[in-house]
Image (cartoon, grey):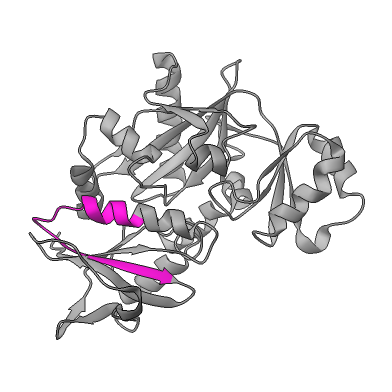
Amino acid sequence: MDYRRIAVIYGSDSSEWEVSVRSGRFTASQLDGSRYEVYEIFARFGEWSLAAWRPMGGERVEFPENARPKIDKNDFSVELDGRHVKFDYAYIMQHGTPGENGLMQGYLEMLGIPFSSCSAFVSAITFDKFSCKSYLKDVDFVKCAKDLFVRRNEVNPDLARKAVEALGLPMFVKPTDSGSSFGVTKVKRIEDFDKAVELAFSEGQTLLCEEAIDGQELQVGVYSDGREVIALPVIEIVSENEFFDYDAKYNGKSQEICPARIPDKDRDTLQEAARKIYRRMDCSGCVRIDFILTPSKDVYFLEINTIPGMTAASLIPKMVRTAGMEMTDFLTSIIECR
């Protein structure tokens, strides 16, 4: 495809915005400077500005925060050094809203601008954990943990008892539409349930109480190069904490072992399940799919991350390196398959 001006969009309206900035800057740094002009757009709460840019074959130029050119949302462009620059393609690196729930994708779809992630509809479905699981509950290649969906106006004094009777303890209480484990609690005692509900509702309007499944947490990156759906090497997560929470993800409180220490048969099963989910959900670009593999070899689906972390230490770059690829070539394949 004849793309030249690539806009990497980062920052977000969610608690994940700082992680998004790191992901976006790393992604921009890895794009092929011999074939693209790279423009870094910081977008948060409706304010979009050009944070930095890199001319083709040149060095990155960063703008002071108080002197960043504003993005014209009417045509997704910017005025730069007397030039009207209209972006050809958007690489979305916004974790949380509006980059993962379909809002940014909807905007770009209306303007006819190609982008790196799933469509607006698919992004909206996969971002909501309850909706996404509903698409997979009847398939025969993964299982889904039992759950209880709760809206804020449905909370009542009997909710804790109802949840424990349905799901047992421990259970997870999590917002349906948040990432990086913000608002997630592993509840071991019924006395801690109400506090977990309050924390989950600090991130959104709906939550999921979910049965805790015992087993290995394993994650698979999946992408399409325009010809086939490809599964990356499996990563094994060994958390020092109760689960793979924000502290474990970003503060070094976990081991992320790639390739995972599992038999080849289990690896093949997980990769095939990931490819099937990618196709069933009609995903695009690169996604990360999280699983639990139980001691009895049952594969449980946890969630899909359609804008997975992309810092130098993130899981997808580790998978890419383990697969023997360079990040620059990998990102080019994502862009050029559209």
Q: Which region of the structure is painted magenta?
A: 24-43
Which residue lies at the image location 27% right of the left edge and 33% below the top edge? 321
* x then y, percent, for residue 120: 44, 63
Q: Is residue 212 above or below residue 38?
A: above
- Tell me if residue 154 can be seen: yes
Task: Decide which of 18, 307 is in the foreground and name it.
Answer: 18
Residue 69 location, quadrant: bottom left
Residue at left offset 86%, top offset 36%: 165
Whether residue 63 is situated above or below residue 306 in the rendered picture: below
Q: Where does residue 276 sit, x and y in percent of width and height?
A: 43, 36
Residue 8, picture quadrant? bottom left
Q: Is residue 334 left or right of residue 154?
A: left
In the rendered structure, the answer to whether residue 283 lies left or right of residue 178 reads left
Q: Position of residue 186 (x, y in %)?
A: 71, 38
Name the image quarter holding the C terminus. Answer: bottom left
Answer with left or right where residue 280 lies relative to residue 54. Answer: right
Q: Quadrant of residue 234?
A: top left
Q: Residue at x 35, y 79 (%)?
A: 66
Residue 338 visible here: no
Between 254 and 194, the one lying in front of the other is 254
The answer to if 116 sits in the magenta stretch is no
